[in-house]
Amino acid sequence: MDTRRAPRAVIDPKVRKVGFFAPPELSQPGLPDPIPLPSSSLSPVMIPPPRHSSENLLHHARPLAPTVPGASSVSIEGSVVAGGSYGSSSELFPAPMSPASSSYSSSRFVGGGDGDYCLNGAAVASPGRGGGKAATSFPRGGFESPAAKASSVPASGLTTVSVVNDSSLGIRGREKADNGGGSALEAKDQATNSKQKKDKTTKAERRALQEAQRAAKAAAKAEGNKASGTVTSGTAKPAKAIKPPHKVDNSSVAASEKKGCDRPPEKDRKKDVPQPRMQYDDESRVEKAKRRAVVKQTEARNRVELFRHLPQYEHGSLLPDLEAKFFQLDTVHPAVYKAGLQYLSGNISGSNARCIAMLQAFQDAIRDYRVPPEKTFVRDLTAKISSYVSFLIECRPLCISMGNAIKFLKTRIAKLPLTLSESESKASLHSDIERFINEKIILADKVIVKHAVTKIRDGDVLLTYGLSSAVEMILLHAHKLGKQFRVIIVDSRPQLRGKILLRRLVEKGLSCTYTQINALSYIMHEVTRVFLGASSVLSNGTVYSGVGTACVAMIAHSFRVPVLVCCEAYKFSERVQLDSICSNELGDPEVISKVLGREDVNYLDGWANTENLQLLNLIYDATPSDYISMIVTDYGMVPPTSVPVIVREYRREQLWI
Amino acid sequence: MADPKISAYYQTRMAHFGAVTNDWLAQAQSASAITTTPPPPSPPPTAATLSDPSHQKPSFSVIDEFNRWRKQPDLAEAVAAIRALAAVIRSSMATTMMQLEIELKSASDSLKSWDTTSISLTAACDLFMRYVTRTAALEYEDFNSAKSRLIERADKFGEISYTARKVIAMLSQDFIFNGCTILVHGFSRVVLEVLKLAAQNKKLFRVLCTEGRPDRTGLRLSNELAKLDVPVKLVIDSAVAYTMDEVDMVFVGADGVVESGGIINMMGTYQIAMVAKSMSKPVYVAAESYKFARLYPLDQKDLAPALRPVDFGVPIPSKVEVECSARDYTPPQYLTLLFTDLGVLTPSVVSDELIQLYL
């Protein structure tokens, strides 16, 4: 363990600690500081030495199954100290601090009790999140404060989750909530995780698990850096069990502040599981989880370092798994479940389609919803929607338009007058959703088409990339108006969505050219206009769209071809993003390794076994506003610099209302 | 060679500011015959001309009113239109808000159709309609009070537009420093106002004036400047790059300011702005706020064409084509600042203002 600790002592440059840190935590394993501070005395701003945090943890920790000695990560600065400090609360932390647990673990303990799943650092990090979930586990507050480092770690949310059930940490939850506590924290987390045992499982059980996890973690530790994410395989599994509850919380949080908060700079959120097979061991835990994740996803292997902060799963077994469960789910409404399955399988893709499918599923769910006896309509419904959202996130991470739509729905729910009866409220929500879909999506598209066709002249050569519903409508409408133009469709692997657009346009009689994105600079000199769709437009004018869009816009700009982006106003976001890395979505890397219809191209078979090979399948990218000439929205044609104006002006008047 | 269609807008400008031609003289004479009416708002003839037929035949009287205002060389066309529309409200016999709005709309349409190529006219009419009707007064029960509120706002808009030039002149004084050299292009009354005020404030500067073919408006501008005792040097249009080294800033007016923040102005502005940008000289645009139009050209050909004949002085063989477009579009990246009556703005603010007004 010590060897494992060493790399962690070095603060990963990618990891950013936010908040208070106890400075010497990492570097002085042997620092004794025997002043035990009662957890209660620690205020969030205090930065006690690691040792104290463990004290706090002990204080707050629920009696946990004895983790293996190694597991108890709370080794403050060495097992000795740990032993001492934990002496009093030995029953709380059955597992002595594992040597592995570095000093940071103490701080990590924010999560407390959850032992295994200690949200490895990450969990600890999110005080905010933790608050919500903490109910299940020990009072997080205590832990938050002591862990100076922990405080910074936003992963508190995760902690809550983990605490809830057995150690299985919802890694996923953690990932989501992981606001990037320092990696150090994370490392500690792992250590602490071991300490925190779930009370659900027996001590022996947990200890065994911890041992196994610790072994796995040790193996995985080689890579160091975002240790937290991984919670070390062991914790990961337990985390999973916790995941559902955590997830729910996270999803609601995520839903509401998806863009910014969810992805703190240091996201070790993602489960960092070195041995994916480890996860399946915890089936029992997963089953036991209270609000188990409906979607069980395994960790992907060979994850790209730079994108460790993004969730990535192996998609293979997910869909059949979920399909089998269709009739067993009582926590998720069947309409929502169906939407989730459709996202997962790729049947519904494209931000408008996904948003509409989600809203219609919510309409059904609201229609069938009955208020439980002692609950209030508004709060319970909001919680239910949040749980649905978390399920959908598990299937596939939300896109920005969906996030906005969820915000709209929650705002409408919150604004329901209390005097309405249940059925009236439901009817009102139903019509609100209907109106949102009609006004913000369908009518908006019509207005966009009306504006954009004025920019198409006879003799134009229009270029478009991928499949965008708005662009397709524009082209078809212009053709119907009798304008003479031809279309060049640029497409790219692995999704090859341009083929769908090609088929649809050719059916209607447009003359089209189809090419792949590597021929872009070859063909750009003939082009007079470029029409692109967008998943969202951010506040600094950056267009967030399917991967490859930035290339198209950049090359068009260098050829001085005007680039028009067509995007409905409800997709505008207050977020600002400078690159495509800090927030993105990772797809299934398997599809990159295979070429459909070309069995002979099998050079990448077995890529997962290669240590130094990682496949990256990004879904989105960010196009800087300099390359964009104009954005066509339902508010007219605006320059990219005016997007924050629209967001500001209309947010006041409830942009999505 | 048949005369290509000349946009009426440019006919007016030619009449007002071009080189002295016979046409101009004729117009000037007819103008002087009618300029006895006082410029200030709500002159008596308004009531006379707009008595009965105003609501029955608004188009007719609006155009009349408009022409009446337009005769004054100092008044911008758009301001004349605004005044005319204000007069429509004042003299309207409508009894409901809806009717009044319909009247206004039809009056505005007829004004716009009088010259479809004039951007500032169209923009001013649209802005007037938005500004006037965008008031809570319309929700008042009492029609008369709502109408008087509309008249108030219309007059205010007219005032703002009328005094816009003075405001712009004041705002731009800080940018003219002693010993600077200013390059101007085309005859813009706003820019003239700016330079007049600077001269009055005893600033020492000199002006390089482009000839401005085919209008030769530069000649007239240099005349005016010479009267102010400002040192003026005339340069032909091709010599702009040659003289750009000694220039400190470029001042132009605008026929229209488009939503992207670019401007539409007399032919040659784009080229000057490009040269200035490549030599890192600031380009300042002086434009009143009623010129903000809801257009968004992507390139030069995206504009509605406005033609003016080019007189080369010698006959041209018939199979030789002549580029007769009278104006061009300067994209916002070549402009530094816009001086408007709303303040000193960057080009990206135009869209903000339009969004706030229109949405």
Image (cartoon, rainbow, N blue to C red):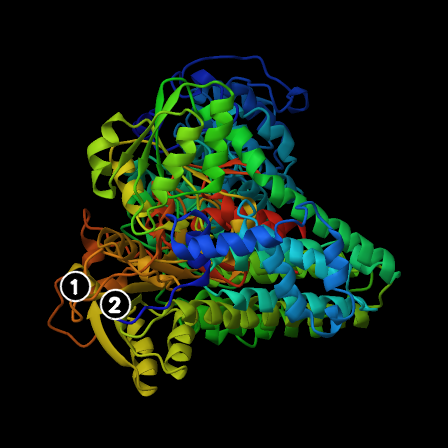
**Residue placed at 21% from the left, 42% from the top?**
B238
Residue B187: x and y, percent?
A: 41, 43
Q: Which residue is mark 1?
A: A519
Work out whether residue A255 can be spotted: no
> Pointers 1 and 2 in contact (CB under 8 A)?
yes
Q: Which residue is mark 2?
A: A490
Question: Are tags 1 and 2 found on a single chain?
Answer: yes
Name the residue nearer the viewer: B113 or A355.
Answer: B113
* Classed neighbour count for the residue bearing mark 2: other residues with Cα under 10 Å, few (<14), some (14–19), many (≥20): many
A395 left or right, relative to A316: right
A444 left or right, relative to B277: right
Position above or below: A1 against A133: above
* Classed neighbour count for the residue bearing mark 1: other residues with Cα under 10 Å, few (<14), some (14–19), many (≥20): few
Name the residue nearer the viewer: A430 or A64.
Answer: A430
Name the residue nearer the viewer: A180 or B76.
Answer: B76
Q: Dot 1 lies on which element?
A: helix
As shown in the figure, which amino acid type bears the numbered disc 2?
Val
Q: CA distance from mark 1 to mark 2?
A: 8 Å
Work out whether residue B70 can be spotted: yes
**Residue placed at 82% from the left, 64% from the top?**
A373
As shown in the figure, which amino acid type bears the numbered disc 1?
Ala
Q: Quadrant of the C terminus of chain A?
A: bottom right
Query: Which image quadrant for residue A454?
Result: bottom left
